Amino acid sequence: MKRIIAAIFMVAIAAPSYANDWEKFYKPLPFAAQRIPAQGEPEQVPSTGDADRDLESMWRNGFAPIGFSSFNSPNSKTADAVRLGKKLKANYVMIGTNLASSTTSSVPMTLPKTTTSVSNGNASVYGSNGGYASGTYSGTTTTYGSQTTYIPVTINRFDKLAVYFGEVPKMGLGIMSRDLTAQDVAAIETRRALPVRFVRDASPAYVSDLLPGDIITQVNGQPFSDSTLRAAVLAATPFTVHVYRNGQYRDIRITIPEGWQVTASAP
């Protein structure tokens, strides 16, 4: 018995404690380790309803998603999402709630019901010697029972999503990449490439006219790899990327200026 109690106690200690569902269902993203922690309460920004457009808008201004919370709930409250954003030291939180379902049913409510009836009457009596008497009577009858009333009840469920954004340090190209698609591979005939998803405003990629949708296939004449691109960025000297854009290839010269340079210890 002592062992069982000890085991239960250890599980209770190990079990995580969550302040709310936003925290319970929070999932961190890779950018969480690279951002600049914010101070104070995060600003709540509206969503356009287009996730890709929202993400591009934030990235262009130097902010990347550090994590998100997604779950279904019987209420549409969002205050705890902002509180979690402050705890995460996020700069912005983008919150969306959507009515997922609405179910209407009836709940029976039974109450006691008492019915009372009253009876009244008159009576007259005549004697054999001509005498006469009359009177009235009154009586009540009570019936005990119950009555059931059905009350309509509507239950709503909401899909809730919060994306937390943090400031990304100025370093490297200033691009956000994406995975290669089958169409990309068919077009460039290689899997050794880096598709550009978004470009940060005023970044080295932006200044060099690298565009969203470009696919980097070579770095300084060598087939693309993470190591060749990183080496070029670390060198802090101008380098050339060979990109595929709208069915054609072109070379783009990129310079990493002071303030955007990456150190060897950077992730």
Image: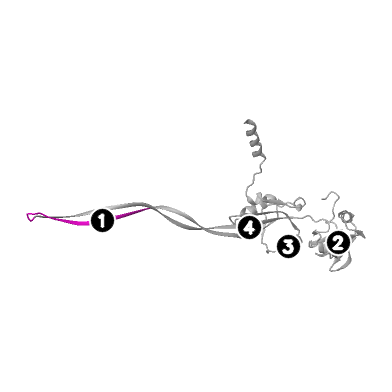
Task: Please give the label number shown on residue 216.
Answer: 2
Residue 119, horizontal then vertical, whole percent: 26, 56
Q: Which residue lies under the disc numbered 1?
A: 119
Real-space Cα separation, disc 2 to disc 3, in angstroms: 21 Å
Residue 86, horizontal then vertical, whole percent: 67, 51
* Precedes in sequence: disc 3 or disc 4: 3
- At a point 65% along the width and 52% down the height, the residue shown is 22
Q: Is residue 159 visible?
A: yes
Q: Amino acid at mark 3?
A: Asp
| 1 and 157: which is toward the camera | 1
Question: Is label 4 in a helix, a strand or a loop?
Answer: strand
Q: Which residues are magenta?
A: 113-130
Q: Which residue lies under the disc numbered 3?
A: 52
Q: Amino acid at mark 2?
A: Ile
Question: Is label 1 in a helix, a strand or a loop?
Answer: strand
Real-space Cα separation, disc 1 to disc 3, in angstroms: 80 Å
* Precedes in sequence: disc 2 or disc 1: 1
Asked if the magenta segment contains residue 114, the reply would be yes
Q: Amino acid at mark 1?
A: Ser
Q: Which residue sits furthest top?
A: 2
Predominant secondary structure, magenta span: strand
Q: Which residue sits furthest front?
A: 128
* Precedes in sequence: disc 2 or disc 3: 3
Real-space Cα separation, disc 2 to disc 4, in angstroms: 38 Å
Q: Tell whether label 3 touches label 1 (CB within 8 Å).
A: no
Task: Please give the label number shown on residue 159.
Answer: 4
* Precedes in sequence: disc 1 or disc 4: 1
